[in-house]
Image (spheres, helix red, strand yellow):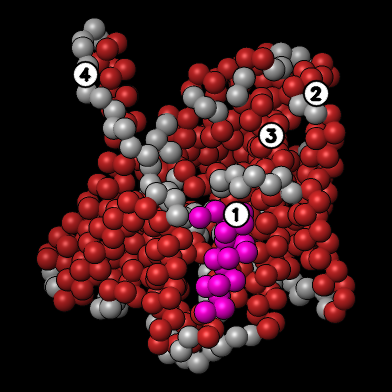
Amino acid sequence: MLFNSFEFICIFFPLVTGLYFVLPHRWRWLLLLVASCWFYMAFVPVYILILAFTILVDYYAGIWIERSEGRKRKLVLTASIIANVGVLAFFKYFNFLNESIAVLVRSMGFHYGVPDLGILLPIGLSFHTFQSLSYTIEVYRRHQKAEHRPGIFALYVMFYPQLVAGPIERPGNLLNQINSTTPGTGMRSNFDYDRMVDGLRQMIWGFFKKLVIADRCAVVVDQVYGAPDQYGALAIAVATYLFAVQIYCDFSGYTDIALGAARVMGFNLMVNFRTPYLSKNISEFWSRWHISLSSWFRDYLYIPLGGNRVVKWRWYYNLMIVFLVSGLWHGANWTYVIWGGLHGSYLILALVFAPLLARFTKGIGLDALPWAKRWLNIFITVQLVSFAWIFFRANSIHDAFTLVQRLFSTPLLWSDLHQLLTDLPRSMLDLTGVLVIAFMVMDPLFDAWAKRDKPVPKGLVGTALFAALLVGILLFGYFGSTSFIYFQF
């Protein structure tokens, strides 16, 4: 079920939320579990069996790990990891690996006849796999007690607001809120008007980002990236910058709707974005973009590999491994691997040349102008991130390199945009441009309000601001129940 569908907005969300506060506390978990199953089965019903397998494996693994000692604990954890990663690899990476092997074998002149699997990737498989894995790892590390009630553990994995596209929760946060025995917290929250208003405001902000900004940008992006050899440098640059806006608004919009829906019921989910395009370097970008995933890789891959507590070459190796795996996590395509590799390269090069860059900025007097240095760093970071987005968005390796080649080999001509104007309505392009510029101005402030980093203006002013967002959605929203980009991961 899509957040931006009539079924969710007008039926599912108000009905589930209303029943949640009507029911006694002891039955709320069952309502949310049934609602989460229904929510997930609205996509492809049979794929809930895959979720059930993951839940059963990790439920029993957590109990066995808690009861075991020595090598047996590690064996159970290993079995859990193999089972989870095995399911992910089968559904998400079999065809990718099979096609890669086929290309290699055929290039050597041999016949290769293993067919691809004719199956669809289950929605959100990477997300709930990583969330379930974090539970067994935390139990193994003795940071979390094993959950002995299968229904409660199933709800932890399947909690509908963040089931399909995160944030990737940890048991120390979400599971503990589900198990909360403190009145007024988590599952034992009573209806609170102010909290409901806060949650609905965050949901409205998320809908605005998705429907008004992301889905309008998508029209231009899809036009250019669907025919990369037909457009010149300026059109490709415009489409790429618009994709940077699109993917941020699409993904963070989903997250805001998820956090807002959970907040209405009394749950506080992990913040996943903090205005990442205001980052001064790539490292900061990844501390503000998809925070739940980057922190997952930090805690469960980067640090176990040794992190930065090793010799330099090994440190750089650890960074590159993490980003290559992160790229592969996003999709079974070499474009995502290159995207991850680019970000890993950015970080490593920044570390290698940090002393030289520090001397250079000091030598030209930039250190004496901290505001100029900050905005220059933000500008450079946005360019690097946007360039990497080309590989993330391109439909294939061939398309990606075609876009890069045309971006740097064709002149910047206004006629490129004229080609876009002939392919798309002028009024639509003008409105998209105006809305994107307005959003860039609004985002830091509204984002801080939605996350409660800053207090929302009180009284009529605060109400009017979010009412204006709602009117903007109704007037300028690009309706059509388009899926969220990260559903494919």
Residue that numbered label 1 is attached to = 5
Q: Could one spot residue 302 in this view of the protein? A: no
Q: Which mark is residue 421?
A: 2
Classify residue 313 by image quadrant. top left
At label 3, which amino acid type do we have? Val
Residue that numbered label 4 is attached to = 113
Determine the residue positioned at 45% across, 87% down.
25
Q: Nearer the viewer, mark 1 or mark 4?
A: 1
At label 2, which amino acid type do we have? Leu
Mark sitting earlier along the chain (3/4)? 4
At label 1, which amino acid type do we have? Ser
Mark sitting earlier along the chain (1/4)? 1
Q: Are marks 3 and 4 in contact (CB under 8 Å)?
A: no
Q: CA distance from mark 4 to mark 2?
A: 46 Å
- Front-most of residues 469 and 400: 469
Mark 1 Cα-neighbour bin, 10 Å: few <14, some 14–19, many ≥20:
some
485 within the magenta span: no
Say left or right for 97 vs 350: left
Mark sitting earlier along the chain (4/2)? 4
Residue that numbered label 3 is attached to = 219
Residue 283 in percent (x, y) is at 57, 49
Classify residue 242 by image quadrant. top right
The stretch of residues the image draws in magenta is 1-19
